[in-house]
Amino acid sequence: MEGHFQYAMLREIHEQPDAIRRTLALYTTSGAYGLELNPEYFEPLAQWGNMHGEVLITASGSSRHSGLAAEIILEDQCGLAVDVEYASEYSCRGNNSKDLRNPSVIVLSQSGETSDTLAALREARRRGQKTLAITNVEESTMAREADLSMPLAAGREKAIPATKSFTCQLTVLALLALYEGVSLNRIDPAALSAHLSELDSIPDALATQLAGWETQMAALAAKYRNATTFLYLGRGVHYAIAREGALKLKEASYIHAEGYPTGELKHGPNALVSEHVPLVVIATVDYAVDGSVLRYEKTLQLLRDMKAQGAKVIALANSGDKDVAELVSDCVFIVPASEYLLPISEVVPLQLFSYFMALEHGVNVDHPRNLAKAVVEHGA
Ligand code: G6P
């Protein structure tokens, strides 16, 4: 037992509001006009970005998925050119890569010790690139070896499936994007202040939704326990959450799942959809952002098509969205938020779904078979 929780994973899911609060407290200060970015962490970043605005993010597992979200945010909000590489791939390229770019490199890692990501960091340093490590362990090897370190304040994460470290990574990456947006004159002071106060409201919003999600996801896990594969779909920044939801389900419950960009369903994976292969579709929307509305409308059309096809669909949608709810088998509501902050909320019910699916299948969710919290063997 973990306190009054049966497993550390469930405790850590519930710790997310506090973990995000602690992380925000590190990186923000109260100024005359509300919250501001804490110069202690952000001023050193002034010399970090390269003049061509190229960024390379490299990571493994869940940490890579927060990198996929950051890719969209840094590109859309700041206009940077961002690549995300699997650390295990990037670190193997060696001298074969004649790279004309000279990106600033971000390594993302809960542990700060994953062999492949550490090797990627060392490779970036060998190439003379400026490096930033975002890790949950301030004294970790990556935090020490990178030029700059932005620690998370998630607190120790024991369960093998990452939960609170993931949402804290999304939080720090959102702050980094705000800093870059301000530096590049893409975000003005009033918008920064509005973004920071919205970020600040997220922990309370999560705390009020957790109990309802927990009850609903336990019921959905029981309902869908015999599914053989789940296809998770999301567009834009939400694709990262589809990937993370699918990984979480695989590692926690041993049920096969894949994450795809929503529009790719019809280019192959739809052949798999059946009574035993449901879809999990992220169909939230931020009406203030054109691209988000476009994505939402395309997603609604896909949901209509899937209804006609007889597919079973679990959707994540804005609270009270009847248009989505009427088209799907089950609808999980999320309190509306802005486009780039929605992922922090969306992933939490998906974490709970994986947790309860693990219980349905009798898996010790804190220690799934064949997995380690940090893969540190060379060449693993
Ligand atoms: C292992 C864990 C994953 C984790 C990945 C990266 O594979 O089982 O849950 O996402 O390592 O770990 P890191 O500590 O680098 O974030």
Image (tube, rainbow, N blue to C red):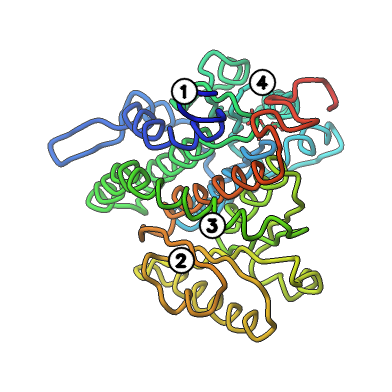
Label 2 to label 3: alpha-carbon separation: 15 Å
Q: Mark 1 sits on what residue?
A: 3
Q: Mark 4 sits on what residue?
A: 113
N-terminal label among 4 and 1: 1
* Foreground: disc 4 or disc 1: 1
Say which mark, if any, is on residue 317. Answer: 2
Q: Is mark 2 within 8 Å of ligand 1?
A: no
The reply to whether the C-beta atoms of the residues labelled 3 and 1 are less than 8 Å apart is no
Label 3 to label 1: alpha-carbon separation: 35 Å
**Figure quadrant of residue 370:** top right
* Foreground: disc 2 or disc 4: 2
Identify the residue at image location x=62%, y=55%: 222
N-terminal label among 2 and 3: 3
Viewer-side residue, 84 vs 258:
258
N-terminal label among 2 and 4: 4
Q: Which secondary structure, mark 2?
A: strand
Establish if 152 lies above or below 262.
above
Q: Amino acid at mark 4?
A: Glu
The reply to whether the C-beta atoms of the residues labelled 4 and 1 are less than 8 Å apart is no
Q: Position of residue 198 (x, y in %)?
A: 29, 49
**Figure quadrant of residue 254:** top right
